[in-house]
Image (cartoon, rainbow, N blue to C red):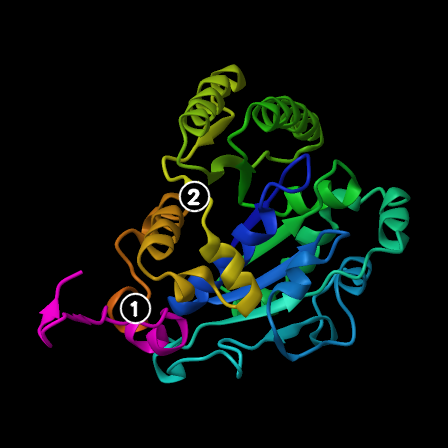
Amino acid sequence: MLTLTVVATKGGVGKTTLSANLGGLLADLGYRVLLVDADVQPSLTRYFKLSHAAENGLTNMVMGGILSADCVSHIELPPEDFPGDHSRLNVQGGFMHLVASDTRDGRLQDWLSNRLDRLVRIRMSLASADVQRDYDVVIIDTQGAVGHLQDAAVNAADILIAPASPDIVSAREFVDGTLKLMERLESSVNMGFTVPAMKAIINRVERTVDSDAMSGLIRNQFLEMRGRVSVLSTTVPSTVAYKKAATAQVPVHWIDPIKAGDVMHALLWELIPSLVNKYAPNHRGEIVQAIRPAHESPAEPEPKEEAGPAGSTASA
């Protein structure tokens, strides 16, 4: 089982969007995916429709030290009301389950602050033989602030994913915050912990000269991190498809199977090289046919020819 934790030191950089769309693509490829919403703002919990809503969520999982069935919600993929031919969607037998966020009251954070084992609570909950047997990939979405809950989510990861926005203020904040986060994590090495590899993703890239310049700045400033963080070659563009996907509560490659679909596949391949050249079965050809009736704009009507003075037609 592989665990990916999506982490940032500030909010609004696209952590939840990446978590949801990576999970959706992996499920479409036939993998059994567990999403864990470890953010006090439960955006990932609300992203997809549920076919089964569990009674409990993150708080019980962390406090109990085990992932029990009453903490696991089931995601409806595709949603029943999603337009299009469902027989072509999610046909490989993959699925997504969810451990919902229920931490807004601060009870879990307070509980963690008094625990000497707070760094291992999430990792311990995911380490049981049942979880290892039932899931192929775990994706953990985190809060955009340093704290005990973020530390526990980071310590559970095999790979850390850090999205960065390509504007000057965000780039500087990202580099500074990531350096501090890495220093914080490295202090745990003295207690026998291993710092996971961190992969940075330049996210929400606009097609502008300024955006290209900021992308270059982020890459160059990672030299300061002395190899502790690598920047992926794949960048995620800022397109309306991601907002449409969130509205429809489906993975973005179902809304835009060509451009966004290609980006998400390339991103997944960089994160998990063993999946290189493995496509979702409905990528491009079939999926376009499956969703076209519901998502294509109607064709523009042909312009009418105007009658001339002698009953002939005059071209426009």
At horizontal 44% and vertical 72% (from top left) the residue drawn is 94
Q: Pointer 2: residues within 10 angstroms few (<14), some, or many (20+)?
A: some
Q: CA distance from mark 2 to mark 1?
A: 28 Å
Q: Pointer 1: residues within 10 angstroms few (<14), some, or many (20+)?
A: few
Tell me if 102 is positioned left or right of 200 in this view: right
For label 1, the SS is: loop
Three-letter amino acid code at disc 1? Glu
Location of residue 207 in the rendering, given as x and y in whole percent from the top left corner = 39, 36
Three-letter amino acid code at disc 2? Pro
Q: Is residue 300 magenta?
A: yes
At horizontal 66% and vertical 52% (from top left) the residue drawn is 123
Q: Does residue 249 appear in this view?
A: no
Task: State the extent of the magenta-drawn residues as a range.
Answer: 288-316
Image quarter of residue 127: bottom right
Location of residue 139 in the rendering, given as x and y in whole percent from the top left corner = 56, 55
Q: Nearer the viewer, residue 7 or 65?
A: 7
